[in-house]
Image (tube, rainbow, N blue to C red):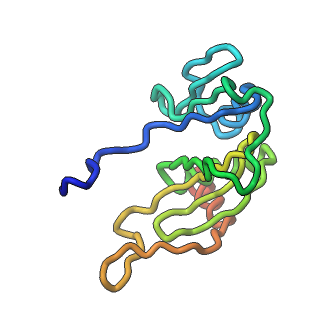
Amino acid sequence: MSEASIHAGTRIGHVHLKVADLERSLKFYCGVLGFELTQRFGNSAAFISAGGYHHHIGLNTWESAGGAAPAPGTTGLYHLAIVYPTQAALADALQRLMKAGVPLDGAADHGVSEALYLRDPDGNGVELYWDRPREEWPRSADGELAMFTRPLDLKALLASADEMGH
């Protein structure tokens, strides 16, 4: 490990979003996507997670109650990305979105992963994805990672949920 490299065990712990309406955000992240509420502070903040972690996502209205989404062409969050452990788990997420009538902005096969793109109720970009096993990642002739963007077959993705009994 060179002095300039970050420790290989470093990871992103959570994302904290400014939202306009806490209840609306909880209906999306918990009601649609299925995250669990771990702690709430009235109508001003909530912390949610998967699998009992203290929080993967923080939501607050401290500076944004009733606020508008950032205007196009401004800086800020492009998207938050939520990684699912399996293709079937991602397919389950797609089924949840379809049942709730949440539209997709796009869906892509990146070689290393399959991804769904959408917006939360505050207009924040959200990517839902699963990673293929590392040994299946596309590589160039010299061994470099060779990610790409191709259309994702949503019917095939949904079929993976059916195969797992979802």
Q: Quick check: 123 above or below 139?
A: above
Q: Which residue lies furthest to the top in this view?
A: 42
Foreground of the two, 127 or 18: 18
What residue is shown at x 57% (from left), y 69% (from top)? 109
85 relative to 2 in the view: left or right: right
- Residue 78 in percent (x, y) is at 62, 53
Q: Is residue 92 visible?
A: no
Q: Quick check: 136 above or below 5?
A: below
- Residue 144 in percent (x, y) is at 34, 76
Foreground of the two, 114 or 146: 146
All told, the count of numbered labels is 0
Q: Quick check: 42 above or below 99?
A: above
What residue is shown at x 48% (from left), y 32% (from top)? 51
- Residue 70 in percent (x, y) is at 73, 45
The quarter in which the N terminus is drawn is: bottom left
Foreground of the two, 89 or 140: 140
- Residue 95 in percent (x, y) is at 70, 50
What residue is shown at x 75% (from left), y 31% (from top)? 20
Q: Can residue 122 be seen in this view?
A: yes
Q: Residue furthest bottom?
A: 141
